[in-house]
Every structure is written in structure tokens, then in C-alpha cells.
Image (spheres, helix red, strand yellow):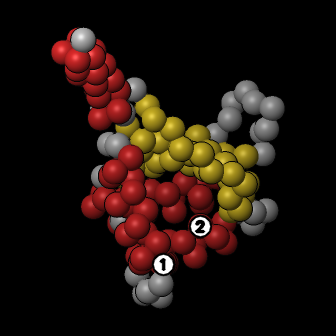
Amino acid sequence: MKKINTLIATFTIMILTPFYTFADHLDVIQVELEENCGFNQYLAIAEDFNNNWAKEYDYKVEILIPVQSNDLKSIFWVGRSSDAVAFGKAWEAWVSDLGKSDSVASILSGRFDKCGNNMSRRSYGAY
């Protein structure tokens, strides 16, 4: 009986492991733009983020603009990392760098803050 339980546990782990190991991590932030900041301006900041900070941390952002939605005022930041571990490392580096006034993260964060307000944030595993 012990061997059967061990085989069942091993088989279950072998089946489920790929789902957890290979899932991309999506970081989704709902943003409402300030009146003095248009979509193209926010998009330019996001492109600077991708080019000047994110590459080093296995993170890439896309900005989604709704075409059909119950909320046409918001845009959506969709950041992608290869997995939750990579996201955690990027998040830790970002938060750490915010304390350094001359860091790329701090400068980008200031630009983002002037341009939009984060309304909500969610994380997803993408398979």
C-alpha cells in the first residue's frame, strides 16, 4: 500500500509540476491617466521602462487600451516575467532602487506618478 501511495504522489507531482514551473507571470495594473498626460506620453514612459530598466530583470511591459469595455477611462499595464520567481527578483530590485533618488527606477517612477494613478493591481499565471 505504501508503494502505491508513493507512486500516486510521484505521478501527481510529475503531472502538476509543469503547470507551476513553466507559467509566465503577468503583472496587471489598471491605470487612469492624469488630464495632462495622454496615452502616447504614458506609452513613451513605458517604452523607456522596457529599454532602460526591465530588460535586465526578465520583465517586459505592454500597455493595453480598451476598445470595448465597461471602463473606457482606464488603460492596463501588462508586465510579463518568465515566472513568479523572476517577477519577485524584479520587484525586489525595483523597490530597492526607489530609495536611490538618481536611480533609473526612481526617475521612471516619478514620471509614471505624474502621468497616471494606479487603480488596482493583479497577478496571474499564464500558461
Secondary element at image label 2? helix
113 up-or-down from 81: above or below: below
| Rendering coords of residue 80 (x, y %) | 42, 44
Q: Earlier in the sequence, mark 2 or mark 1?
A: 1
Q: Which residue is mark 2?
A: 112
Residue 107 higher or lower than 101, as above or below: above
- Position of residue 102 relative to residue 85, above or below, is below
Circle on res. 98: 1
Residue 31, percent across and down? Answer: 68, 53
Three-letter amino acid code of the residue under disc 1: Leu
Marks 2/1: CA–CA distance: 13 Å
**Residue 28's spot in the image, x, y percent?**
56, 45
| Outermost residue, bottom side | 101
Q: What is the secondary structure assignment of the residue under circle 1?
A: helix
Left or right placement of residue 74 versus residue 77 in this view: right
What's the residue at 69%, 51% (across, down)?
120
Of residue 103 and residue 25, the one placed in the foreground of this image is: 25
Please state which amino acid type lies under the numbered disc 2. Phe
Q: Position of residue 32 (x, y in %)?
A: 73, 54
- Residue 83 is drawn in which quadrant? top left
